[in-house]
Image (cartoon, grey):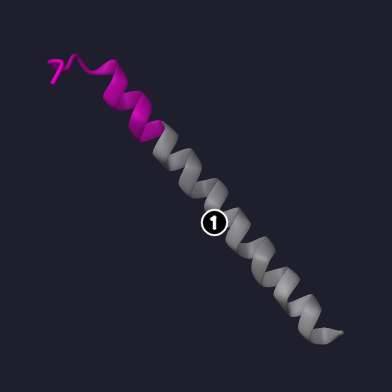
Amino acid sequence: MTEAADEIEALRYSLRLDEELIGMIQKIISSLNSRPMPNG
């Protein structure tokens, strides 16, 4: 049972990291979109 609990904790931790990454990526994308860029 401990092994499963450890896996769940690891998953929860990696999900939290994913959420932070997604937030960072969204900030980068929005800053890129607000910058005037030539279409290419």
| Quadrant where the image shows the C terminus | top left
Q: Is residue 11 magenta?
A: no
- Asked if residue 31 lies left or right of residue 23, the reply is left
Percent from the top left, x then y, of residue 7?
71, 75
Percent from the top left, x then y, of residue 5?
80, 76
Q: Residue furthest bottom?
A: 2
Percent from the top left, x then y, of residue 35?
23, 18
Q: Which residues are magenta?
A: 27-40
| Quadrant where the image shows the N terminus | bottom right
**Residue for badge 1:** 17
Secondary element at tag 1: helix
Q: Residues within 10 Å of mark 1 (few under 14, many from 20)?
A: few
Q: Residue at x 79, y 79 (%)?
A: 4
- Asked if residue 18 lies left or right of residue 34, the reply is right
Amino acid type of the residue tagged 1 in the rendering: Leu
- Indicate whether 19 appears above or below 10: above
- Asked if residue 16 lies left or right of residue 26, the reply is right
